[in-house]
Amino acid sequence: MRILMLCQTWFADVWRRHGHEVVTAGLKDHFDYKIDSHLRHIDDVIQKCGLTGNPDVIIYSDDSYPVSVTGLERTSIPTIFYSVDAHHHLSWHKYFAAMFDLVLVAQKDYVQYFSEQGLEAKWLPLWATESEMPSEQKQYGALFIGTLNKKFNEERVEFFEKLSKIAPVTVKEGGWKDEYPLARIVMNQTVRGDLNFRVFEAMSSGSLLLTERSENGLFNLFEEGKHFACYERGNADEAAAKINYYLAHPKECRRIGLAGYDEIVRAHREEHRAATVLEYAVRLTKRHISHRFLSAVVPYVHCAWRYEKVSQSHGLLCFTTALEALQLGLSRGEVPTDHHLLYAILACIEHDRMSHNTNGYSVLKAMQERFPENQMLRLCLARVTLNLGMEEAATEYVKEFNMPPLQAFEMAEQVVRHLFKARALKEDYPEAYSPPDKGL
């Protein structure tokens, strides 16, 4: 197969060893093809990346950054999206995923949110990126290596501050590869109960993994007491008791650590996940997704707000792409949900704000003509029309509300302000969909 990998280099070497042609593409130097600018169109990437022909499959792997390649919703090539950090980015990942023919999800409990969108979604847990032979030489009792910054994870810092006072635990930042085999116990703490890389990397060292009792597939893959040990999230006393127990019982500690290592080698290394993804890719064909283009509006708007903070031109490009996707969706008869409609309105308004033209206004009018009964759409259009100085036309849009025009315009202003609260939030904002007669 010819495989184009976007944003990550995962599995590339494994597939090459099996005779597949693979090109990795991204914005950094370590990719085979370095994309020279954010938001390049996928057709441009395909033309310049160096594959001997069009790829048989395009795989976009989550790197926790905004969308970096556009046009994936339009390509005729089968596509896969691998969502790793859905626990952080679900609010736009579940709509971004609608651009693709298959979505793989690293966090098991989040698969349902993609399936609810009518998407083909499968669980693909993370893996051990590297593994070291277990070492008999031990330098640490219990060891944690990870980000320790109160600004980003105050709970983690406070937990380890307490734990270090009641158990022999070393806490540090930096590389793990050479350190984990030197620990009797490797500790894991999650951000949001995620099944993270540290689980697999710790077990791959042959040391005993002591991790939070979390979900997202942990207990589907491994058995507590056989492959790893657990403590309740945030419970430093229980974690300390487990550390002290296993350090006092080194043979049991070693036995569980080696059992975990054996299980990683058996089923949870990169080559295992690469084989699974390739099996999906070989059978993959283009799927009809009834809301593909309207869903694409959501991530483009989300990412436009992020790009705008550093580059006005890239922010505008995202809003323009959102508007194009919106028009395509409407032309193909896609029916918007309340969430689609919210972001469609935001795309129109934000596009015109940045571009200083009225293309978004024209699309907004076309939407209102297609969905004349939608009150939120009518009020937003009235507000935009009024801002353009067309009071008579704005008055026509609010006639059906049976109230004085000035009162209706005030309600329209409140609706738009309410919708824009979505800009400040990382998660979905369902209250933004409240119709005007429910508190607005």
Image (cartoon, rainbow, N blue to C red):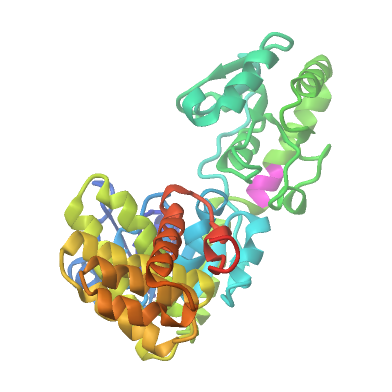
Q: Nearer the viewer, residue 137 or 147?
A: 147
Query: Is 309 in the magenta?
Result: no
Residue extending farthest to the front is 404
Magenta-drawn segment: 262-266
Displayed quadrant of residue 368: bottom left
Rendered location of residue 358, percent (x, y): 19, 73
Instruction: Judge whether 148 appears above or below 419 on screen.
Output: above
Q: Which residue sits at x=41%, y=89%?
A: 370
Q: Is residue 78 left or right of residue 248?
A: left
Magenta portion: prevailing SS class: helix
Image coordinates for residue 39, horizontal then vertical, percent? 25, 61
Q: Would you say residue 265 sits in the magenta stretch?
A: yes
- Name the residue at 24% across, 71% down: 46
Residue beneath the point at 51% across and 58% down? 91
Does residue 22 sit above or below 392 in this rendering?
above
Question: Do we see residue 81 in this rendering?
Answer: yes
Q: Is residue 234 above or below residue 214?
A: above
- Image coordinates of residue 83 in percent, x first then y, are 51, 58
Residue 79 in view (yes/no): no
The residue lying toward the viewer, choosing from 226 and 80, is 80
Which percent across, then down, holds residue 366?
32, 85
